[in-house]
Image (cartoon, coloured by chain):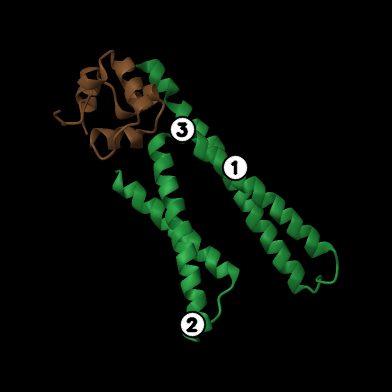
Amino acid sequence: MKNRLKILRAERNWTQADLAAALDVSRQTINALEKEKYDPSLPLAFKAARLFELPIEEIFQDGVEI
Amino acid sequence: MKQQTTEATNYSSRIKKRNLHYILFSIAWATSLIFIELAASQGHSTTALPLLLILLNMGIGVGMILAYIRVLKVMDELEQKIQLNALALSVGFGCVGSMTYSLLAKAGFAPQAGASEIVTFIVLVYIASIFIGQIRYR
């Protein structure tokens, strides 16, 4: 699943540690998310959406067209 | 983001605190094992001392398990995934590996192995699985 976490983080001048603290996860998790090696759970995706004040679909894209 | 940087230690300090409890229990459990071995080697097998030590060791072991569960509960989802994958692999390989080795020993192809060897094998599989999991998500 693709995501824009790195872009959104960079726009706000946050480090991975800052974003990890905001989402209450480890820096390793943020790194794995940004490298698209790991897909977040729904609660974490919602947390990110609330943090960035964006809809989930504007942060995470699964690339599936129905 | 300064507040969040200050709060950046919350997750890591929670993990560190729970890990410390788990590590202390693990050291206590291993130490009690050593005392039991020492008591047995010094011929205390006919006294109640080894039994008390064994019961103490079991109690500490239960505490160690509960401490590990508490560590798992405070981990974030990716770290939980890595841990649970490692546990599944170590249980799987432990069961299959120990049964296979037992059959080989019965057939005379390998020397008999005790519980400590099996536990050592399971722990090594667990450590390797954790390492591989960490590398995979780096």
Quadrant housing the N terminus of chain A:
top left
Q: Mark 1 or mark 2: which comes first in sequence?
A: 1
For label 1, the crowd category at 10 Å Cα-Cα, with few meaning under 14, some 14 to 19 and many 20 or more, is: many
Q: Nearer the viewer, mark 1 or mark 2?
A: 2
Image position of B2 (left or right of B62) = left
Q: Which chain is brown?
A: A
| Badge 2: chain ID | B
Residue at image position (43%, 51%) is B86
Front-lying residue, A6 or B65: B65
- Percent x, y of residue B122: 49, 61
Mark drawn on residue B12: 3
Chain rendered green = B
Horizontal relation, residue B132 to residue B63: left or right? left
Q: Position of residue B131 (x, y in %)?
A: 38, 52
Q: Are marks 1 and 2 in contact (CB under 8 Å)?
A: no
Q: Residues within 10 Å of mark 3 (few under 14, many from 20)?
A: some
Q: What kind of element bears circle 2?
A: loop
Mark 3 and mark 1 lie on one chain; the one further toward the N terminus is 3
Circle 1: residue type:
Ala
Tell me what residue is drawn at x 50 percent, y 35 percent. Answer: B15
What amino acid does circle 3 point to? Ser
Question: Where residue B58 sits in the image (x, y, percent)?
Answer: 70, 54
Task: Kindly identify which residue carries mark 1.
Answer: B67
The three-letter amino acid code for the residue at tag 2 is: Ala
For the residues beneath circles 1 and 2, the answer to whether they share a chain is yes
